[in-house]
Amino acid sequence: EIDTLFQLYIHCGGFLRAAYELIEEGKIKDETYQIYWDWIAGDIASVGLSERTLSAVLKGVIKRYSSSFSLSSLAKEVEIPSHITVRDYLEVLESLYVLRSYWKEYDKTPFFRKERKVYFIDPFIFHIASLKTLGITENTDDVPKIVEGIVGECLRRNKLKVKFLRSAKEIDFVSGTIGIEVKWQEKVSPRDFPTIEFSQKILLSKKDIDLKDKVKIIPVSIFALLS
């Protein structure tokens, strides 16, 4: 039952209108996507920013979803003249609770001007932005990335300082001495956790569970429920 509810959450997030439509009709209506897009675009316009540039920035975020990027590389890819413009839009979108930035950590030291990852606060906002910028509402290849974003938001809502680590290896999320890796796949094992030392290692799986090993394997659905 928990897994079924989590699968629904991947598609409709915490937006009640979208949830009711998905549960009762099996599909979220196009007008619902439009209503929430108009909310985001309207808030952007209210602070004097452009919907067109908003679309370009979000398109770049989706194309690099769950991957790290620099402001300059994103600006170049979506043909925005300045990385400062990208920064400004990302900061406004974060203040509007649309997305969050996660900073890279090199050997436990954060670098705020370097690469970052960006995730939407709610998976339904991902689908809204994907539809409005790429014309795509559902893509199974995106699900592992969406799940990774859900995990990040669970951590941030618990007031944890969360970064991602990249040195010789990369790990999805780091909070203090805890390392968390997300593997949305049919089968996982402790070997799927990068060979990086943490006092606590958590591997989040699609359905496997194993709390006996040093690497604790927990289904994402249960982790999200307990968060």
Image (tube, grey):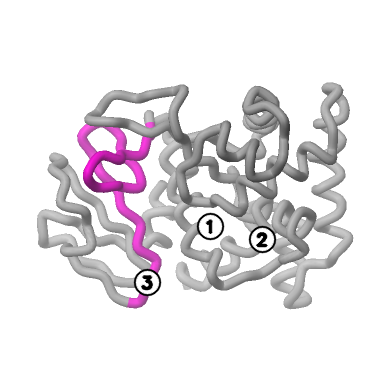
Label 3 and label 1: CA atoms lie apart by 13 Å
Question: Is residue 167 covered in magenta?
Answer: yes
Q: Disc 1 marks which residue?
A: 146
Q: Is residue 16 visible?
A: no
Q: Is residue 198 visible?
A: yes
SS class of the residue under badge 2?
helix
* Residue at 74% over, 55% down: 128
Q: Using the image, determine if residue 101 lies above or below residue 185.
A: above
Q: Nearer the viewer, mark 1 or mark 2?
A: 1
**In the picture provided, is 207 more to the left or to the right than 143?**
left
Q: Amino acid at mark 2?
A: Cys
Q: Amino acid at mark 3?
A: Gln
SS class of the residue under badge 1?
helix
* Residue at 30% over, 34% down: 175
State which quadrant residue 30 falls in: bottom right
| CB-based contact (under 8 Å), mark 3 and mark 2 | no
Q: Nearer the viewer, mark 3 or mark 2?
A: 3
Q: Disc 2 marks which residue?
A: 12
Q: Decide which of tag 3 and tag 2 comes sooner along the chain.
A: 2
The numbered disc on residue 160 is: none
**In the picture provided, is 119 more to the left or to the right than 220?**
right
121, 1: nearer the viewer: 121
Label 3 and label 2: CA atoms lie apart by 21 Å
Q: Residues within 10 Å of mark 1 (few under 14, many from 20)?
A: many
Q: Disc 3 marks which residue?
A: 185
Question: Is residue 9 covered in magenta?
Answer: no
**In the picture provided, is 29 more to the left or to the right than 169?**
right
**Residue range corresponding to the magenta coloring:** 162-186
